[in-house]
Every structure is written in C-alpha cells, then in structure tokens.
Amino acid sequence: VKAPVRRMCTACCGHASAEQCKSSGCMPHEMVKTRLIVRNICCNAEVKLIDKILRPMKGVEDVMTSAVTKMVIVTHCPVECCAPPELLVDRLNAANLGASLLARDGADQAKTLTGTEWLLAHVQEAHAATTVLLFLAAVVLQVAGCSKHREVHFAAAGFGALPIFRNACRSLMHLQIDISALLSCVVLGALALGDSFEAALLVTLFALAELVEHRAMAWISRALNAAMQLSVTRTA
C-alpha cells in the first residue's frame, strides 16, 4: 500500500522554474481565509495566546481574533506543506482552546456536543448558582443567630473564588494583571482579616456579573456570526 502523497506548494517545492512545478503537480502558493470557532476564549489573554500560536506557523500570513464572537480568521496557505486548516485546529486544541472549523453554511462543525462537553459548557451556571445558594444560606443562618454562619460565608467565598483564582494564575503566567488578579488580592485580604461576609458578598456579586456577561456575549456572538455568514452568502 502506497503512502498518500503529500502535496507541495510552489513556495516549498524548491523547483527552479514554473515548468518544473507544473510537471510535478505543485499547488499554487495562494492565501485563503479560514474561519475558526474557538469556544474557550474568555479574555484578552486567550487572544494573545492564539496569536502567539498561529502567527509563527509556516504559511500563516495574518491572524484576526474576536473575543466577542469567539471567531478567528486566519489568512494562510492551505496546502499540506504549509498550514492546512486541520493543522490550525490541532495547534489551538493542543492548548485546550476548543477550536473547530466553521462550516461554509455557518454551522459549527462541532455543534453536536457530547455529555461531558455539555456539562463543561454549563459549569459556569452551576458554579454561580451554588455560590449564590451558599451565600443565601449563610445570610439565613446569620439572621437566625446561628454561630455557623461565618463558616458558611467562608465556604461561599472559597468556592466562588475558585475560577477567579484560576484566571488570576493564568494571567500571571502570561505576565498580565487583570481584574481576576486584583479581585483575588481583595478576597484573600478580606478572609485574612476575618471579614468573611464581605468576601462572600464580593465573590457572589462577581459570579453573577460574570454569568450575565457570559450569557450576553453568547447571544451577541450568535447574532454576529449569523450576520457575518449572511454577508458571506450574499457576496458568494
């Protein structure tokens, strides 16, 4: 069984003349635009990471990323010797960015989610709901005069701050200071001073704000993607 022949473009074949390229069946080195959906974009840190991954790749000319629509538009040579679309997706997914090709009709090729993917897609809602319930339980205990309300406040603050600490560590790894890093300092300071109620209230409000922002951005992303695909269909 013969191994599949790897196609070469005119920029990589090394032939001295166009006639040699034509006789060898070399593909033209032409730039195309490929649209990718990257689900795990949440802030500017991921935008910079995507640019750091894709821009140095052979055959990539330009990278445009929108954190709002979670779409990446890559201008590249699609031949196997340069930067085929599948390789772009593999490089991004190696960094756990959840990338997939956007189909020509505008449907995400990875739209059908497995059970685990569905749970991961709704983990933010579950986290926010649990944080709110813990905070409300602590308030009820405090009003009722129960001495355990401080422990529940501490649990609400600690559980609610988990994604904040995670995002803060990720930002610091990229030598950036964002709202997560600043909020982490405030929460840790409040807990160190024994102000568990203030820490829990701050974390709960931030979790709710993040949830509202996430839902709004998802709605805006779907609307912009639909408008973009409608524009592409009309110009095709």
Image: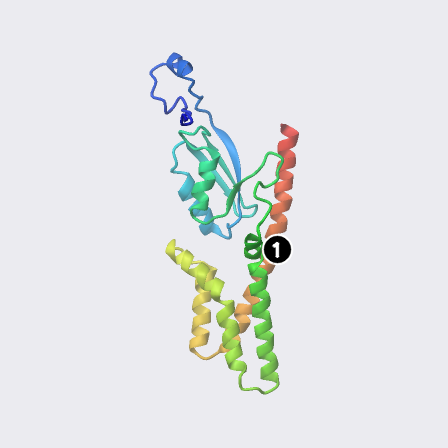
Towards the viewer: 195 or 226:
226
- Percent position (x, y) of residue 48? 43, 47
Q: Up-down: is 17 above or below 41? A: above
- Residue shown at 40% from the left, 21% from the top: 10
Q: Is residue 175 left or right of residue 78?
A: left
- Residue shown at 37% from the left, 25% from the top: 12
Q: How many marks?
A: 1
Q: Up-down: is 79 above or below 220? A: above
- Percent position (x, y) of residue 105? 63, 35
Res. 207 image quadrant: bottom right
Check disc 1 and report the residue beneath it.
215
Q: Amino acid at mark 1?
A: Arg
The color scheme shown is: rainbow
Under circle 1, the secondary element is helix
Q: Residues within 10 Å of mark 1 (few under 14, many from 20)?
A: few
Q: Is residue 202 left or right of residue 51?
A: right
- Percent position (x, y) of residue 47? 47, 47
Q: Up-down: is 84 above or below 182? A: above
Towards the viewer: 147 or 122:
122
Res. 146 image quadrant: bottom right
Name the residue at the front extreme: 1
Q: Is residue 102 left or right of residue 48?
A: right
- Percent position (x, y) of residue 63? 46, 38
